[in-house]
Image (cartoon, helix red, strand yellow):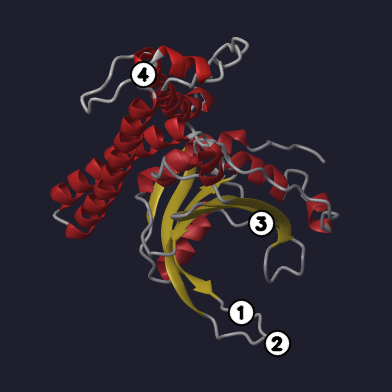
C-alpha cells in the first residue's frame, strides 16, 4: 500500500521522501553496525546511502534542466551577433530604392498576443511540502499509540467461559460448595500475574469446571479453576470432604514428603511439592496416545476451608513447563488475595 502511494505521488514530493528516509535509515544501519560490531548492517547502510546519493543526483539534474528551459530567448530585433550577421530589417534598408520598389510589399499581419506560459509548480515548495508531510506521518505514528494507551498498565485478564452443564448431585448434598465458574472468577484477577511474579505477562486462558473428587463415586464435590500464562499455570480447587488439614499433614509426613506448615487468614495451611503428569496425544489418522510421563514439579498450598478445620480445603497449585516455580511467598499472596473473594455459601 505504501509503495503504491509513493508511486502515485508527484516527482517533487516522492523524491524528497525517498532521500530523507534513505539518509536516516542508512545512517541508522551504519550506527547500529558500529555499535554491535556487525558488518552486514554496515554494508546495507552503505548500499542505502549510495541509492540515496543517486536520487539526489537525479534531483539536481532535473533542477538544472528546469533552469535552462526557463531562461529567456533573445529578441528578434536585437543587433547582429558576434558572427557579423545583419538582421533582416536592417538588410532591407541597405537595398537600393528601385530594388525595394520591385519587391512585393508584405501585407500587414494582425497583431498576435504572445501566449502566456503556464506557471509551473515551484520545485522547492513541493520539496518542503514533502518533508512536512513525512514529518506529520512520523508524528502521527508516534503520537497515536501514546493516545490510545490507558491509564492502567495492568494487563486485562481473559474472561471465564462460564458453565452450562447441570451440576452433579454432590453439589446439592454440599450446601457450601462453590462452582468451578465461581472459582475461575475469583482466581482470574487483573493482578494475578503480578502476584505470581511475572507482571509483564497476560493470561492466555482461563477455565473452570464443577467436577467430583476421584475414587468417591461422585459423592464429593471438587470444583477447580485454571489460569494459564506464558510462564506459569495457576490452579485453584476446593475439596469438600471430611479430611482436615491436620489429618492431611499426618498422612504426608507418614509418606515421607517434605512439607511445611503455616497459618493463613487464621486457618491451618501446609506447603507441599509433587510431580505433575503429562500426556501426549497424536491427532493423526490413527490417533495414538503416548505413555504418561512425569511432568514439571508443582508447588501446592493447601488451606482449610474454615478456621476450625472441620474438614475440606482449598488447593492453590503453581507449576511451569520449565520446571521452576515461584517461592512460597507468591502462593501466600495469591491465597490472601483470592480466598476472601470466594463466595461463602451457607445454603444452596
**Is 167 placed above or below 116 here?**
below
Query: Spatial distance from mark 2 to mark 3, Cα to Cα?
Result: 43 Å
* For discs 3 and 1, the disc positioned in front in the rendered view: 1
Is residue 62 visible to the viewer in this orientation of the structure?
Answer: yes
**Near-viewer residue (144 or 193):** 144
Image position, residue 108 (x, y; %):
60, 11
Query: Spatial distance from mark 4 to mark 1, Cα to Cα?
Result: 108 Å
SS assignment at label 3? loop
* For discs 4 and 1, the disc positioned in front in the rendered view: 4
Return the disc, 2 or 4, that comes first in the chain's sequence: 4
Return the disc, 3 or 4, that comes first in the chain's sequence: 4
Q: Which residue is mark 4?
A: 91
SS assignment at label 4? helix
Q: What numbered label is drawn on residue 281?
A: 1
* For discs 1 and 2, the disc positioned in front in the rendered view: 2
SS assignment at label 1? loop
Is residue 312 visible to the viewer in this orientation of the structure?
Answer: no
Image quadrant for the N terminus?
top right
Q: Which residue is mark 2?
A: 285
How many discs mark residues in the rendered view?
4
Q: Residues within 10 Å of mark 3 (few under 14, many from 20)?
A: some
Residue lying at the far bottom in this picture: please name it: 286
Q: Which residue is mark 3?
A: 241
**Near-viewer residue (98 or 22):** 98
Label pair 4/1, CB-CB below 8 angstroms: no
Amino acid at each position: 500500500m505504501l509503495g503504491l502511494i509513493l508511486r502515485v505521488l508527484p516527482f517533487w514530493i516522492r523524491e524528497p521522501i525517498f532521500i530523507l528516509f534513505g539518509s536516516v535509515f542508512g545512517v541508522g544501519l551504519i550506527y547500529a553496525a558500529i555499535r554491535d560490531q556487525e558488518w552486514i548492517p554496515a554494508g546495507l547502510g552503505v548500499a542505502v546511502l549510495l541509492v540515496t546519493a543517486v536520487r539526489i543526483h537525479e534531483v539536481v539534474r532535473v533542477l538544472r534542466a528546469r533552469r535552462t528551459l526557463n531562461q529567456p530567448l533573445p529578441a528578434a530585433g536585437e543587433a547582429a551577433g558576434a558572427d557579423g550577421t545583419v538582421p533582416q530589417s536592417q538588410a532591407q534598408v541597405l537595398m537600393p530604392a528601385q530594388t525595394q520598389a520591385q519587391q512585393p510589399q508584405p501585407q500587414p499581419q494582425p497583431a498576435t498576443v504572445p501566449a502566456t506560459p503556464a506557471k509551473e509548480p515551484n520545485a522547492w515548495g513541493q520539496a518542503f511540502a514533502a518533508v512536512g508531510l513525512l514529518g506529520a506521518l512520523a508524528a502521527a505514528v508516534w503520537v497515536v499509540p501514546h493516545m490510545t494507551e490507558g491509564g492502567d498498565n495492568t494487563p486485562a485478564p481473559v474472561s471465564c467461559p462460564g458453565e452450562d452443564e447441570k451440576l452433579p448431585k454432590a453439589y446439592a448434598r454440599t450446601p457450601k460448595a462453590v462452582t468451578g465458574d465461581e472459582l475461575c472468577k475469583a482466581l482470574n484477577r487483573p493482578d494475578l500475574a503480578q502476584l505470581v511474579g511475572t507482571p509483564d505477562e497476560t493470561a492466555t486462558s482461563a477455565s473452570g469446571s464443577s467436577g467430583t473428587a476421584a475414587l468417591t463415586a461422585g459423592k464429593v464435590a471438587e470444583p477447580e479453576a485454571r489460569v494459564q500464562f506464558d510462564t506459569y499455570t495457576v490452579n485453584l480447587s476446593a475439596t469438600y470432604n471430611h479430611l482436615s488439614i491436620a489429618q492431611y499433614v499426618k498422612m504426608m509426613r507418614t509418606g515421607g514428603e517434605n512439607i511445611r506448615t503455616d497459618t493463613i487468614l487464621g486457618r491451618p495451611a501446609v506447603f507441599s511439592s509433587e510431580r505433575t503428569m503429562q500426556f501426549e496425544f497424536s491427532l493423526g489418522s490413527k490417533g495414538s496416545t503416548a505413555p504418561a510421563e512425569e511432568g514439571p514439579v508443582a508447588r501446592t498450598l493447601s488451606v482449610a476451608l474454615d478456621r476450625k478445620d472441620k474438614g475440606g480445603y482449598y488447593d492453590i497449585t503453581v507449576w511451569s513447563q520449565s520446571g521452576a516455580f515461584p517461592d512460597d511467598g507468591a502462593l501466600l499472596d495469591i491465597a490472601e488475595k483470592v480466598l476472601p473473594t470466594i463466595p461463602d455459601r451457607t445454603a444452596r
